[in-house]
Image (tube, rainbow, N blue to C red):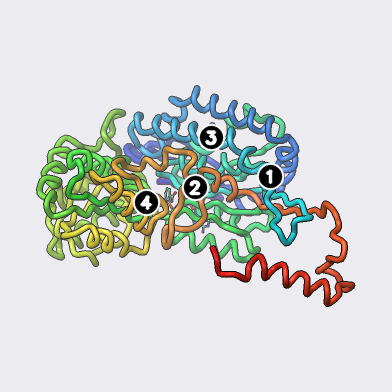
Amino acid sequence: MTTVSPERARTFDSLNPATGEVVGTYPVHDAEAVEAAIARAAEAARWWAALGWAERRRRLIAFKSLLMRNATRVARKIRDETGKPMGDAVLEVIMAVTHTDWAARNAEKVLRRRRVSSGLVAFNMAATVEYHPLGVVGVIGPWNYPVFTPVGSYVYALAAGNAVVFKPSELTPGVGVLCAELFAEVVPEQPVLQVVTGLGETGAALAGSPGVAKIAFTGSTATAKRVMKACAENLTPLVAECGGKDALIVDSDADVRDAAEAAVWGAMSNAGQTCVGVERVYVLDSVYDRFVNELKSLTAQVRPGEAEDAPYGPITMPQQVDIIRRHIDDALDRGGRAVVGGRESVREPFVDPVVLVDVPEDSAAVREETFGPTITVTRVASLDEALEKANSSSYGLGSTVFSGSARRAMDLARRLRTGMTAINSVISFAMIPALPFGGVGASGFGRIHGPDGLREFSRAKAISRRRFAIPGMKPTSFTRTQQELDRLVKFATLLHGRSRR
Ligand code: NDP
């Protein structure tokens, strides 16, 4: 929710989505300003990389402590710009702090030089691999988790030794600016983390700049395609964290109450504006009625509002309300039933919980990302049917399984075509910093978080060093003789020619 000032459009306002009140005014950074930030970042990147592992670790741990001590202040800013309740905003800061701590403490272990086996054919070689920073990483973030989501990219990029230019969503510029100010308190020497504010064009300038070594984009699939086009111009690599249409499967021996609680939280918290929020549920026939009754009783008291302790707040982006309305209308017009809420649940800027059943699988409410506090619940005859339906989505971000059998749940988790699966819990993978986070298909590619997230912002450097010469064995030289080659063939046949395991 933003307005650009008409006179020369040099600033824009950030508004509280619940009240419409202006909560901040920020510059619109144009392409020139973005280039200037990237140029400053290039120098900062050299300085930051030269600091070394121990000092970067110290600074990042100092940053996480400062962030934690300022949790209420940052949460207040999140609440001002997104409308989410204070409790959820604080939880988001705690998750960001946890990731910062992990990235700081593990970067060296994951990325430092290590020896690898050189193999029998190259036994006279020493082989090492190490991960070098890329330089300047551009981070483009969404508004729904304005601290947790970009931190998942930028602290991993920083821990790997890069400088970052971060473009927050135009809906949440203040949160981005505040975090960068806190970072500058622990790294005052150089602009290692800079924020550029503005609308889509500011992000486009960042993605299209030849000065950035990689773009970490989090947002919708549609925008990711535009960003990818801009990146293609300079062959800039991209990690794309996009939307989802996550499914939850309830097995016949699952704890039905637990599963329903997880479904309600996964679908309704943050007004359903969660990339890994639960949007579809597939329930085994034998527990379907009990599950739907539990959903009804759990949502009975859940009403969004403006209060600090409301279960959830408004729809942050006004245009999203039309999408939510269209999905509910389409589901109901095509034979679906609302067992909780209905068309009347949309009362802008708030949307009450909506639980839809008997919705055709090809309707918008089942196929497209709704990003609202709605959920579809579908009865299935078998786990195979649940799996097939869950997997028939162009998206593949997260998924959830509730089952009484750890073995069956693990098997289902592996067969779900998503980047992450939570078992008997919801969204739990996002709270574990050591686990990679990212999707498949329309949900994007590349990984943030964990060792993969650190490597995502590094380039592998391979070094092979000859330790001693092998007399009569120089296969990569024009002085090589036929006898040498014959000896090599004999040796390789001995090693690899038999089909024994
Ligand atoms: P958008 O795609 O609308 O925007 C994402 C970011 O891209 C914003 O900062 C936006 O700036 C910027 N942007 C817009 N146009 C361009 C452009 N042409 N070039 C470069 N940058 C541009 O997404 P939302 O902010 O609405 O976020 C919601 C989406 O994000 C949902 O689909 C959600 O599922 C997904 N998401 C994915 C996550 C994941 O980890 N996989 C996590 C969180 C959200 P501006 O806002 O100024 O237009």
Residue pointed to by mark 4: 398
Residue at image coords 46%, 30%: 74
Residue at image coords 53%, 49%: 140
Of 315 and 477, the residue lying toward us? 477
Residue pointed to by mark 2: 141
Q: Which of disc 3 and disc 1 is earlier in sequence?
A: 3
Residue at image coords 34%, 36%: 84
Q: Is residue 13 visible?
A: no
Residue pointed to by mark 1: 114
Mark number for residue 102?
A: 3
266 up-or-down from 127: above or below: above
Image coordinates for residue 200, horizontal then vertical, percent: 51, 54
SS at badge 2: loop
SS at badge 3: helix
Instruction: Name the residue type under label 2.
Output: Gly
Instruction: Name the residue type under label 3.
Output: Trp
**Label 1, residues with CA under 10 Å away: few <14, some 14-19, many ≥20:** few
Image coordinates for residue 352, horizontal then vertical, percent: 21, 43
- Please tell me in which quadrant of the rendered image residue 108 appears: top right
